[in-house]
Amino acid sequence: MFQWISRLVLFIVIFLFTFTAYAVSGINLPYGVTPTSREIYDLHMACFYICCVIGTLVFSILIYSLIKHRKSKGATAVHFHEHLGLEIVWTVIPFLILIGLAIPATIVLKHIHNTDRSALTIKVTGYQWKWKYEYLDQGISFFSNLSTPQDQILNNAPKGKWFLLEVDNPMVVPVNTKVKLLVTADDVVHAWWVPELGVKQDAIPGFVNENWFYADKIGTYRGQCGELCGINHGFMPIVVQVVSQVDFDKWVKLHRPNAGNEANQTLTMKPLSEKELMILGKAQYDKSCGMCHQATGLGLPPSFPPLKRSRVVTGPLDGSIAFVLTGVPGTAMQAFGQQLNNKEMAGVITYIRHAWGNDKIIINHKQPIIVQPSDIERVRRKNL
Ligand SMILES: [Cu+2]
């Protein structure tokens, strides 16, 4: 008997110990940095504790009854039918428990859906496989791509601290500000999910869903796409930087399209050397194209065609450019004209025309390999 009890105690201790270890290791919900994330956490914990009490009660009575009234002790069951009192009790108690859970849950839900009086509105669009952020009042718009190097993904280099949770351009928002999100998608269903902000919002093509957060702690918060959206679903993380109002204003100044925009345009139009184009192009290719067409240029047929020896890539220059500018509507091949500027586009096209032996085919056809930003601009004009 003593051995039996000591085993039970040991089991309970180990259970509780691992349970707190789970909470510490992040298996529980994070407490978060927004009022809603905390409300969600508290609601979750309240439900959890209620379940614990109910579970303990039910299992105690069950186990007690099993032991106390076991057959070997000669117990006989009591037979009775339609006990009104008992039936009322076991209907009313669960009813009260459910109402007791529904009331706080409804209050929290109402709060989550109240996007009134927000100070900043950001449109979030999910793409295969990146996010686009548009600051509607500031006129700022950019794509946010995974920035983990291919070498780490392919296990050729040790993995960094934020492996698959890092991006080139994070969302930047001021602290203590109600930020409204208008969430949609361009191709398939994605979900914008940042646990510490208490936001998980489906991004559905053709719909605009609203959500909001109010971060009260400066910091960097990370999340992922929360809806299985294709082969690179795990490669479109979300990074939100919550900064002071002063830092946010600085950031806006730096990224506002008018500020230095003209200088920017002439900069992106400047002719580049072949080497510059190749370096720029390879980096851009890894970031924007490699996930589908692969570093080897062999693609992943039948979903993603190879670019090695591709007729589009090795054909006339303007055709290659126009194809990448406009994409193929209704497929994963997006219109990159809206995503890359002339300089980036010139780099990418130069790179794909150079790489994987494509240059030899193009030279045979006596076509140019190198593409300058001015070529891109020319084709852009023609296709608009
Ligand atoms: Cu997604």
Image (cartoon, grey):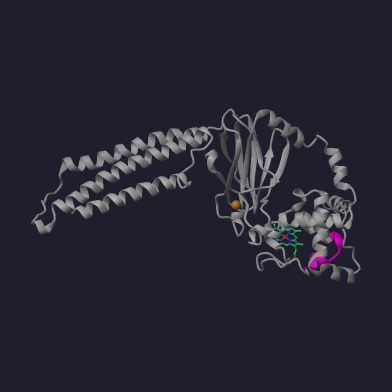
- Residue 154 is drawn in which quadrant? bottom right
Residue 101 percent coordinates (x, y)? 36, 37
Report the residue at 59% width, 27% height from top.
117
Q: Nearer the viewer, residue 309 or 4?
A: 4
- In the image, residue 284 sits, relative to residue 181, either above or below, namely below
Asked whether residue 45 is in view, the answer is: yes
Q: Nearer the viewer, residue 305 or 198?
A: 198
Residue 311 falls within the magenta-colored stretch: yes
Extent of the magenta region: 310-318
Quadrant of the frame with the N terminus:
bottom left
Residue 249 percent coordinates (x, y)? 71, 30
Report the residue at 12% width, 58% height from top.
71
Asked whether residue 321 is in view, the answer is: no
- Residue 325 is drawn in which quadrant? bottom right
Residue 287 percent coordinates (x, y)? 71, 54
Q: Is residue 330 left or right of residue 278?
A: left
Residue 235 falls within the magenta-colored stretch: no
Q: Nearer the viewer, residue 140 or 173?
A: 173
Considering the whole magenta stretch, tell me its main secondary structure.
Answer: helix
Q: How many marks?
A: 0
- In the image, residue 207 sits, relative to residue 285, either above or below, namely above
Report the residue at 21% width, 47% height from top.
61
Report the residue at 77% width, 50% height from top.
340
Q: Is residue 70 left or right of residue 121?
A: left
